[in-house]
Amino acid sequence: MYTSSTQIRVRYAETDQMNVVYHGNYAQYFEVGRAESIRQLGFTYKELEAMGVIMPIVELQTKFLRPAHYDDLLTIKTTLKELPEDHRIEFHQEVYNESEKLLTIGKVVLYFINAATKEKTTMPEAFRARVVSYFTL
């Protein structure tokens, strides 16, 4: 299992009239968590695209447990529970506040797509080589 964490501070523009983070912003928070998770593995989305793979989102699930508010420092925990063996990769995400209370949970599924043919493919071998070490005993 691979887990990473990154932090983001809630900006005023991300809150609604109730001083609560607008629900649509969690997709962006999850994106930050995924991008930084991949970066912590030594890659960027840009590099994966240069390898000929794009990764569209095909599924997004979010469950809101507690609200986040303006100026909260959020921790986004991103986990790969399974080693991707086919064309899909599944990120499980949790958002915590500074008191370490769980605010939101989510799951985001992306497909590995060959950028040239737009056909499903597997993860680039260099990326797989880096990730596989987290799933071996």
Image: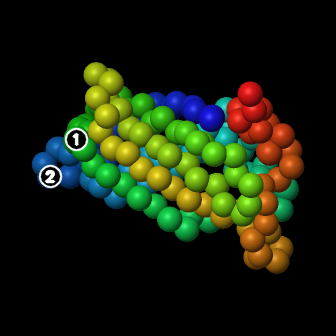
For label 1, the residue is 66
C-alpha span from label 1 to label 2: 16 Å
SS for dot 2: loop
Residues marked 1 and 2 touching at CB (< 8 Å)? no
Q: Which amino acid does label 2 sit on?
A: Gln
Horizontal relation, residue 127 to residue 71: left or right: right
Q: Residue 118, labelled with which disc?
A: none
For label 2, the residue is 17
Q: At 63% from the left edge and 45% from the top edge, which residue is drawn? A: 82
Rendered location of residue 92, percent (x, y):
50, 46
Q: Quick check: 102 above or below 30?
A: above
> For residue 89, what is the image quadrant?
bottom right
Can you say which quadrant of the picture contains the N terminus? Answer: top right
Q: Nearer the viewer, mark 1 or mark 2?
A: 1
Rendered location of residue 79, percent (x, y):
55, 39
> For residue 35, what is the image quadrant?
top right
Rendered location of residue 77, percent (x, y):
48, 35
Q: 10 Å neighbourhood of mark 2: few (<14), some, or many (≥20)?
A: few
Q: 10 Å neighbourhood of mark 1: few (<14), some, or many (≥20)?
A: some
User: Residue 110 versus residue 51: which sits nearer the camera?
Assistant: 110
Horizontal relation, residue 42 to residue 27: left or right: right
Can you say which quadrant of the picture contains the C terminus? Answer: top right
SS for dot 1: loop
User: Residue 29 versus residue 15: which sits nearer the camera?
Assistant: 29
Rendered location of residue 28, percent (x, y):
45, 52
